[in-house]
Image: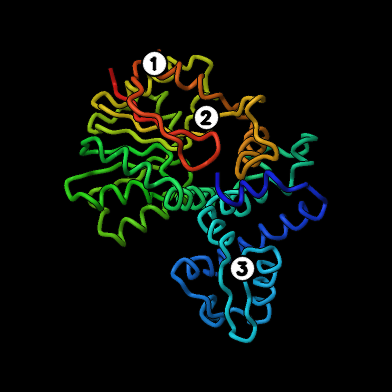
Amino acid sequence: MTTADADATKAIPTPASLFNGYIGANVLQALHDLGVLRRWEEGESRLGLLAPGADRGRLAALLQVMDRLGFAEVDAAADTATLTPAGRDLLRQQGFFTWCVAGHGAVWRDLAGLTEGRLVFGRDVVRDGAKVALGCAEADRLLMSKVQDEVLGSIDFACTVDIGCGGGDRLLRLCDEDPGRRGIGIDISEDACLMAEARARELGLDDRVEFVRADFLALLGSGRTFPEADLVISIFMLHDMFASTRDHPQLIRSLRAAFPAARYFLLADTAAQERADRAEPAPIFSLGFELAHAFMGVRLHERAAYEEAFEAGGLKIARREPFGAPSTWLYLLEAV
């Protein structure tokens, strides 16, 4: 549990905390989009360099909100804005806000219409796939990559398929580390694939990394195989896969059949919290993840359901690690 989460468990909820939290989340996203968070990460604090070209008065107003919420200290005389300890903790968790505010903002704005059935998710209300991918990449970089890299460092692999690759950061990093590695990224979002392809060209990896825009579940149903892959990665896609069928062991068997040479599967997801285990007040991310998927019509499963399906489908759990967010787990699975 982070310092901010520990403090939250002691706080008494008030209308002001709810209102100010909404304002603060949107201000944080604005600072993210202006590049301020990146420059804070780099150690910059001078207002003139935090967002070059921005209107100084409006930038100061945004930073003043962060000051009043306790995440930054604005020194008007020195013309600086520096992060507090709570602000540094917030910076580590920025990916959750990108996912929530930028990626799912349209969903939150239209909850009433979705509830009444006047609007349909995916047709009338569409989340921003590129921003969702970006938020996941930020969470991966700041909260999850060390765990993931430590687990991957314990195995050998030459060709990786990343299902739900988003902007391609994870796959590109793995291939950049070893000139002998190749990779295939699969994602349903055209924007995410275009972002990934552009990044591959920038890094000079486009000859070893391919990105496929496709619905993986449709690919799975088509019978297409990827015989070259010896490692399969899928981060935060299990809930979508499990929602597609009631026969979860058969789903795992189909997954194995699509990658006949795969020795390892690295799978991660956020599990549904059992009511008895739910923290009050809710930790960061959980409420948004659960609410978004309720309106998407995607059922979330408890950890035991995943683990039972892995074993029944022929995948042995070699490792299970906590993975950066509440009720979130990283599994290294071996084909048996």
Q: What label sits on residue 327 in the rendered view?
A: none
Write the residue at 33% across / 22% down: 256
Write the residue at 45% across / 39% down: 323
**Residue ranking furthest to the right:** 15
Q: How far apart are marks 3 and 2 (CA)?
A: 36 Å
Q: Is mark 2 on a helix, strand or loop?
A: helix
Query: Of callouts 1 and 3, which one flags the residue occurring earlier in the amino acid sequence?
Result: 3
Q: In which quarter of the image is the C terminus?
A: top left
Label 2 crowding class (10 Å Cα cut-off): few <14, some 14-19, many 20+? many
Q: In which quarter of the image is the N terminus?
A: top right
> Up-down: is 56 above or below 101?
below
Nearer the observer, 306 or 259: 306
Q: Where is residue 92 in the image (x, y as percent from the top left)?
A: 50, 55
Which numbered mark, 1 or 2, is in the foreground of this view? Answer: 1
Query: Which amino acid type is marked by label 1?
Result: Glu
Nearer the observer, 312 or 229: 312
Q: How far apart are marks 1 and 2 (CA)?
A: 17 Å
Q: What element carries label 3?
A: strand
Q: Identify the residue position indicated by label 1 in the image.
A: 311
Write the residue at 32% across / 33% down: 232
Q: How far apart are marks 1 and 3 (CA)?
A: 48 Å
Q: Identify the residue position indicated by label 3 in the image.
A: 72
1 and 3 marks in contact (CB < 8 Å): no
Callout count: 3
> Up-down: is 101 above or below 61?
above
Label 3 crowding class (10 Å Cα cut-off): few <14, some 14-19, many 20+? many
Write the residue at 25% across / 36% down: 154
Q: Position of residue 234 (x, y in %)?
A: 40, 35
Q: Identify the residue position indicated by label 2 in the image.
A: 239
